Amino acid sequence: MSVTAVPARTVASRRKPPLHWSRIGVHGFLIAMSVLWLFPLAWAVYTSLRPYSDTQLNGYVSLPSVLNFDNFVNAWNKAELPHFYLNTLLVAVPSVILVLFVASMVAFSLTRFRVRFNVAMLMLFTAGNLLPPQVIIVPLFRLYLLMKGVPQPLSDNNLLYDQYIGVILIHVVFQTGFCVFVLSNYMRTISNELTEAALVDGAGVWTIYRRIILPLCRPALAALATLEFTFIYNDFFWALMLMKSGDRRPITSALNNLQGLFFSNNNLLAAGALLVAIPTIIVFIALQKQFVRGLSLGSTKG
């Protein structure tokens, strides 16, 4: 029985590299940033599990005498979260679908067809992201008030003001530029030979867009869907300015119902904030694989 000697280089290569001070510093920095990032979430969970009487007696920085889920139950009932969940979905879901649909069509036309001013148009869509929304709120508010529609109950005959469609349209306008910028850069990595081969086979523009380009852009669309749903779901500014009916506003305004006139239960607010964050966590978990894949696309291309 022969024994094969293992070269010294192979044994040495299998050994773990020695720890250098730079490597220790990098790990220490990452651990510190992770703790700093997770501390507010952990503190919110800890606060939400404590009764307010306990924190009032011992202070927030103290060991709890009891932990329970009473704050979550009270926040769910007092803030009427199911109703505001529905309000938010009525705004967020159509907004995300319209944003991705419009942005994908614009990016497709800018990258697949040779238009004289396509670069200028892409810069125009990108520049829209640099405009602060507070700048146009006064003229936009007046425009919404002037646009009267057919008589509708609880809307003062307004077509856009105090209507879900008005908030949806403004989200589509402000979020399309960012999605066009991302999708156009991603579509440029798709070979033009696929489009040319489809044209030779007799495929039309709509067929190329729907059956060739969109399936290839699925990771990028999933990543954008996750980001856009989070952005629109967490919006409070547009809903506050463009909707006057409190029972029609999204869930971010529901937390305001947990605040009293002279007193605020921070434990109850922490529980309500955690309940409000549940849909965004569900969306991220559902699209996690596609989201990570979309973020990593293009990292290995030259």
Image (cartoon, rainbow, N blue to C red):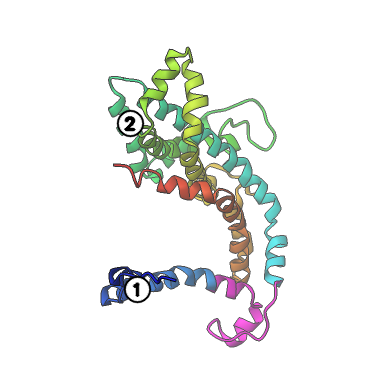
Viewer-proximal residue among 283 and 122? 283
The quadrant in which residue 89 appears is: top right
Mark 2 and mark 1: Cα distance apart in space: 52 Å
Residue 59 within the magenta-colored segment of the rendering? yes
Viewer-proximal residue among 259 and 48? 48
Residue 160 is situated, as x and y percent measured from the top left of the image, at 56, 33
Quadrant, the N terminus = bottom left
The residue lying furthest to the front in this view is 1
Disc number at residue 88?
none
Residue 179 within the magenta-colored segment of the rendering? no
Q: Residue at x 28, y 23 (%)?
A: 117
Q: Earlier in the sequence, mark 2 or mark 1?
A: 1
The amino acid type found where label 1 is placed reads Arg
Q: Which residue is mark 2?
A: 122
Residue 216 is situated, as x and y percent measured from the top left of the image, at 47, 34
Q: Residue at x 48, y 15 (%)?
A: 204
Secondary structure type for disc 1: loop
The answer to whether 176 is drawn above or below residue 249 in the figure is: above
The answer to whether 78 is drawn above or below residue 27 in the figure is: above
Viewer-proximal residue among 184 and 137? 184
Disc number at residue 15?
1
The residues colored magenta run 43-69
The answer to whether 266 is drawn above or below residue 169 in the figure is: below
Question: Which of pointers 2 and 1 indicates the residue nearer the eye?
Answer: 1
The amino acid type found where label 2 is placed reads Leu
Crowd rating for badge 2 (residues with CA inside 10 Å; few <14, some 14–19, many 20+): some
Crowd rating for badge 1 (residues with CA inside 10 Å; few <14, some 14–19, many 20+): few
Q: Residue at x 42, y 40 (%)?
A: 138
Q: Is residue 263 visible?
A: no
Q: Is residue 197 visible?
A: yes
